[in-house]
């Protein structure tokens, strides 16, 4: 047995702002070739699937959010209270109780009701993109057609992030919550800021803005809760109010915090994953055409995007006791980062020996194991079923309507620290 601090390990700094796009891919591949374990800021990083699942599933580790609060002096106020109540920071029987009460409202069958609304939102966003300020350009060949079609197509240019990826999940979350659709931009704003509590850089420099967003959302959610008690509907807030198991019910504070968790985890994340999915499919036009021809591949396309470019490339855990793993001793209070990016490429452990893990392919059989993008174990993402449904509906609808999709400029990648998304994704398509 060897103490982890005594090992000669490669170093990987996931806070390096230059790690974006192909530079990030190359750095991760190099580190994974050297070892299954690396030194990282604040602790260590595990890089293969088996190790990742071990540290995500072990009962000897918890999410280190309260440690982050301690490091940055968050000891009171709305942000501190929210972090204490966040289901990510609740463990043991209390966590099991909350999950058992909220899971029925977010089960696969339960979220199916939102499919028609999702397609309606996407249609509205497409209409807005086509009738944007510049307007579409009508293309016509010498015979007045494109690709043999009798009807000339219109070329549309837009930034996919602004036109689709940003508004779509916030509209869905507004509908799921039972909030007015006109409040979707406010929900997006709050979600974006609230998510920054998990990023050390933001906590160091933007803590007051994060606190303000938390306070504003709490005030908003309390008013929404009162409205739903007086006039229940088929939305999430109403379902949480009515949730009951063996006589146990959620308190108002618990209802609000569960909605808070779903907002914070369901807007910026889906926005980022949708943008990466469209980028990847635009880079593989044959697969985009295939998806248009076979919309039943939308589920596989969503899973492949989640696997290939996870928007949560790193997930942290802190050990509550000493852990021995692979003859390495990890002391209590060690921070372990699980790298979903490399774990998702560990396809032999996922039941697909000999697969080309660095190939993006929506038709490939990827084994029975799902990507670690949503985590694993007791803290598996609460809104994973909803997020998958949004991805599936989004990709199926867009492949049907966005013909000749291509990149119209270079994507602008965000940083991999926190939620890894795209700041800009210029695209061109015909309708």
Image: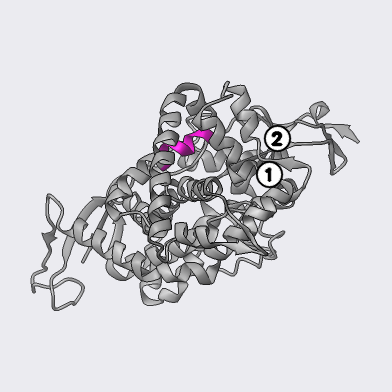
Q: Is residue 86 magenta?
A: no
Check disc 1: other Cα within 10 Å, few if <14, some if 14-19, many if 20+.
many
Q: Position of residue 389 (x, y in %)?
A: 46, 65
* Secondary element type, mark 1: loop
Report the span colored magenta.
191-198
Question: Is residue 227 among what the camera can see?
Answer: yes
143 up-or-down from 94: above or below: below
The residue identified by callout 1 is 47
Instruction: Answer with left or right where residue 415 lies relative to residue 289.
Output: right
Q: Nearer the viewer, residue 85 or 315?
A: 85
Q: Position of residue 234 (x, y in %)?
A: 42, 66
Mark 1 touches mark 2? (CB < 8 Å): yes
* Secondary element type, mark 2: strand
In the picture, which quadrant includes the C terminus? bottom left
In the picture, residue 171 is in which quadrant? bottom left
Q: Residue at x 12, y 55 (%)?
A: 135
Instruction: Answer with left or right where residue 5 lies relative to residue 371.
Output: right
Instruction: Answer with left or right where residue 71 lies relative to residue 235.
Output: right
Q: How is the image coloured?
A: one colour
In the picture, which quadrant includes the N terminus? top right
Q: Position of residue 139 (x, y in %)?
A: 12, 64
Check disc 2: other Cα within 10 Å, few if <14, some if 14-19, many if 20+.
many
> Which dot marks residue 38?
2
Q: Position of residue 276 (x, y in %)?
A: 43, 51
Q: Is residue 196 magenta?
A: yes
Question: Which numbered disc flags the more N-terminal residue, 1 or 2?
Answer: 2
13 up-or-down from 407: above or below: above
Question: Is residue 36 among what the camera can see?
Answer: no
């Amino acid at each position: 047995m060897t103490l982890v601090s005594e090992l000669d390990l490669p170093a990987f700094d996931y806070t390096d702002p230059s790690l974006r796009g192909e530079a990030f891919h190359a750095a991760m591949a190099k580190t994974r070739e050297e070892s299954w374990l690396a030194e990282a800021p604040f602790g260590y990083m595990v890089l293969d699937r088996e190790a990742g699942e071990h540290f995500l599933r072990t009962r000897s580790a918890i999410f280190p959010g309260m440690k982050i609060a301690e490091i940055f002096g968050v000891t009171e106020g709305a942000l501190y209270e929210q972090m204490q109540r966040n289901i990510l920071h609740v463990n043991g029987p209390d966590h099991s109780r909350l999950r058992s009460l909220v899971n029925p409202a977010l089960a696969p069958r339960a979220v199916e009701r939102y499919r028609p609304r999702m397609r309606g939102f996407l249609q509205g966003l497409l209409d807005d993109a086509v009738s944007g300020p510049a307007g579409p350009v009508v293309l016509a060949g010498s015979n007045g057609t494109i690709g043999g079609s009798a009807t000339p197509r219109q070329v549309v240019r837009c930034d996919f992030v602004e036109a689709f990826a940003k508004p779509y999940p916030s509209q869905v979350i507004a509908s799921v919550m039972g909030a007015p659709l006109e409040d979707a931009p406010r929900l997006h704003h709050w979600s974006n800021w609230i998510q920054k509590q998990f990023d050390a850089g933001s906590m160091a420099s933007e803590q007051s803005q994060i606190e303000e967003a938390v306070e504003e959302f709490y005030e908003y959610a309390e008013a929404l809760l009162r409205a739903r008690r007086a006039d229940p509907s088929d939305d999430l807030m109403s379902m949480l109010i009515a949730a009951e198991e063996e006589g146990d019910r959620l308190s108002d504070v618990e209802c609000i915090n569960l909605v808070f968790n779903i907002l914070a985890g369901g807007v910026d994340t889906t926005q980022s994953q949708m943008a990466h999915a469209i980028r990847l499919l635009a880079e593989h036009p044959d697969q985009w055409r295939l998806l248009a021809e076979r919309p039943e591949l939308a589920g596989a396309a969503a899973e492949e995007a989640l696997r290939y470019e996870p928007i949560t490339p790193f997930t942290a855990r802190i050990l509550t006791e000493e852990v021995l793993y692979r003859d390495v001793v990890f002391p209590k209070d060690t921070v372990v980062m699980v790298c979903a990016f490399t774990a998702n490429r560990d396809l032999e452990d996922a039941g697909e020996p000999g697969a080309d893990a660095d190939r993006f392919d929506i038709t490939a059989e990827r084994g029975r194991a799902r990507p670690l993008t949503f985590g694993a174990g007791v803290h598996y993402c609460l809104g994973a079923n909803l997020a998958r449904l949004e991805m599936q509906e989004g990709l199926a609808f867009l492949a049907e309507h966005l013909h000749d999709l291509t990149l119209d400029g270079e994507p602008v990648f965000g940083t991999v620290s926190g939620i890894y998304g795209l700041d800009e994704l210029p695209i061109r398509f015909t309708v």
